[in-house]
Image (tube, rainbow, N blue to C red):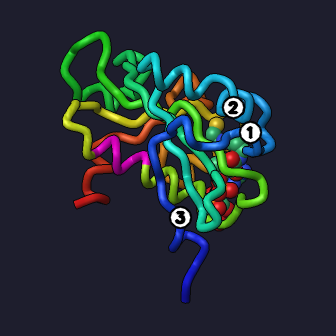
Amino acid sequence: MAGPLDDARVEILGPHHDRSLFASGAEPLDRYFRTQAGQEARKNIAAPFVLILADGSIGGYYTLSATSVKLTELPANVARRLPRYPLVPAVLLGRLAVDRKHQGKGYGRFLLADALGRAVRSEIASFAVVVDAKDEAARRFYERESFLSFPDQPMKLFRPMADISPLFK
Ligand SMILES: CC(C)(COP(=O)(O)OP(=O)(O)OC[C@H]1O[C@@H](n2cnc3c(N)ncnc32)[C@H](O)[C@@H]1OP(=O)(O)O)[C@@H](O)C(=O)NCCC(=O)NCCS
């Protein structure tokens, strides 16, 4: 049976995408997408990706950037297995949002899987994918997707690349 995800695809944000109608219900995420995402892409600060639905509309978006994590921020059992550098490299999933009309249909998980796939396929090493959850609901969403909270920052979560890579083998 054909599902809503069958005709959806992910593209790099370009000038031809109409962002004006996108509304996830999270105002900062909507404003960022409408007013800042294009600039940040041009300045190489963030790479925005958009979900294009069967009717051509934008169903969601996410951004990826390089970041780093302090070794001392990580749980002791994770830090112990890493070299003693002050910082370790990671991929930041800075923003993720699905249009309100299409929430709860699996697109959030689909976009997250797409983002993890891009992080894994990158030739630049990173130890984990890191996310900042904007509220409790977002934190639960990421926890369901096997992200772990940083011990002293419950709204910041990570998933080690060692856990992600096997999913794409
Ligand atoms: C959070 C968000 C990206 C999830 O996207 P979505 O398309 O609605 O989620 P999906 O349909 O793919 O759901 C995936 C799983 O997460 C769960 N989930 C979805 N939204 C959730 C929420 N707000 N709280 C807790 N769990 C949630 C779903 O129940 C589903 O799990 P299940 O299959 O075991 O039932 C979307 O609701 C959104 O854009 N919200 C506003 C912005 C936001 O909060 N962004 C988070 C980044 S800070």
Q: Are marks 2 and 1 in contact (CB under 8 Å)?
A: yes
Question: Could you give the CA–CA distance between mark 2 and mark 3, rounded to whole angstroms?
Answer: 21 Å
Q: Ligand 1 shows up in which quadrant of the image? A: bottom right
What is the residue that sits farthest to the top in this orientation? 86
Residue drawn where x is 41% and y is 29% of the image: 75
Residue 14 appears in view: yes
Residue drawn where x is 64% and y is 65% of the image: 55
Task: State the image quarter where residue 22 is shown.
Answer: top right
Residue 137 appears in view: no
- Front position in the image: 130 or 97: 97
Q: At which x and y percent is residue 105?
A: 66, 66
Crowd rating for badge 1 (residues with CA inside 10 Å; few <14, some 14–19, many 20+): few
Q: Which residue is mark 3?
A: 8
Crowd rating for badge 3 (residues with CA inside 10 Å; few <14, some 14–19, many 20+): some
Is 114 left or right of 7, judged from the image as shown?
left
The image quadrant where one finds the C terminus is bottom left
Q: Amino acid at mark 1?
A: Ser
Q: Amino acid at mark 2?
A: Arg
Is 59 left or right of 117, judged from the image as shown?
right
**Which portion, as a residue range, is magenta?**
115-120
Check residue 10 in the rendering and tell me which mark sits there, or answer none.
none
Q: Earlier in the sequence, mark 2 or mark 3?
A: 3
